[in-house]
Image (tube, rainbow, N blue to C red):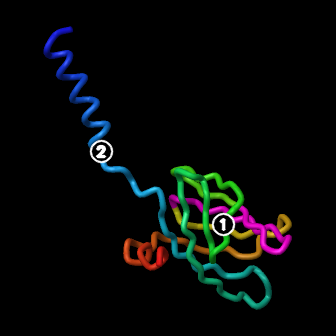
């Protein structure tokens, strides 16, 4: 093996290993409004882990989630009711569906590092 080829392979491996690992967890802050007559507002934070494909909302862990670069979708079973969340990562627009009926919709945005630190406490 030539010296140049060996150097190129070593450099390639070092680049792969030297890249900082992205934090698996991210925090979103969401404000959604109900579709019902009262138009109540719901504010909450979602912590999601793309590596483990899980989401946490208000202390409840989701059923297995589907988390891609473009969308987050997950369900949470609370006392027998299944709440289905879908959030578009490009626009931040999301919906909460119960029994195939959209109950809330609104916008989620990245909560930033300070909020992520608070969520861990």
Q: Which residue is mark 2?
A: 19
Rendered residue at 48%/61% (across/down): 25
| Residue 33, magenta (yes or no) | no
- Would you place residue 95 above or below residue 38 in this image? above
Which segment did they paint magenta?
75-90
Q: Which mark is residue 61?
A: 1
Tell me where residue 10 appears, x and y as whole percent.
22, 26
Label 1 close to label 2 by CB (< 8 Å): no
- Residue nearer the viewer, 21 or 43: 21
- Main secondary-structure element of the magenta-colored stretch: strand
Residue placed at 20% from the left, 23% from the top?
A: 8
| Above or below 5: residue 57 | below
15 w.r.t. 95: above or below = above
Q: Which quarter of the rendering shows the N terminus?
A: top left
Q: Residues within 10 Å of mark 2 (few under 14, many from 20)?
A: few
Quadrant position of residue 47: bottom right
Numbered-mark total: 2
**Left or right: where does residue 40 sit relative to residue 120?**
right
Tell me which label, 1 or 2, sits earlier in the chain. 2
Label 1: few (<14), some (14–19) or many (≥20) C-alpha neighbours in 10 Å: some
């Amino acid at each position: 093996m030539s010296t140049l080829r060996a150097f190129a392979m070593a450099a390639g491996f070092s680049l792969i290993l030297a890249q900082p690992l992205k934090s698996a967890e991210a925090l979103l802050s969401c404000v959604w409004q109900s579709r019902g007559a009262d138009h109540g507002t719901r504010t909450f934070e979602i912590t999601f882990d793309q590596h483990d494909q899980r989401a946490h909302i208000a202390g409840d862990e989701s059923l297995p989630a589907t988390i891609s670069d473009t969308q987050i979708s997950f369900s949470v079973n609370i006392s027998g009711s299944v709440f289905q969340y879908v959030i578009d990562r490009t626009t931040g627009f999301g919906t909460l569906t119960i029994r195939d009926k959209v109950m809330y919709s609104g916008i989620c945005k990245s909560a930033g590092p300070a909020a992520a630190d608070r969520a861990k406490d």
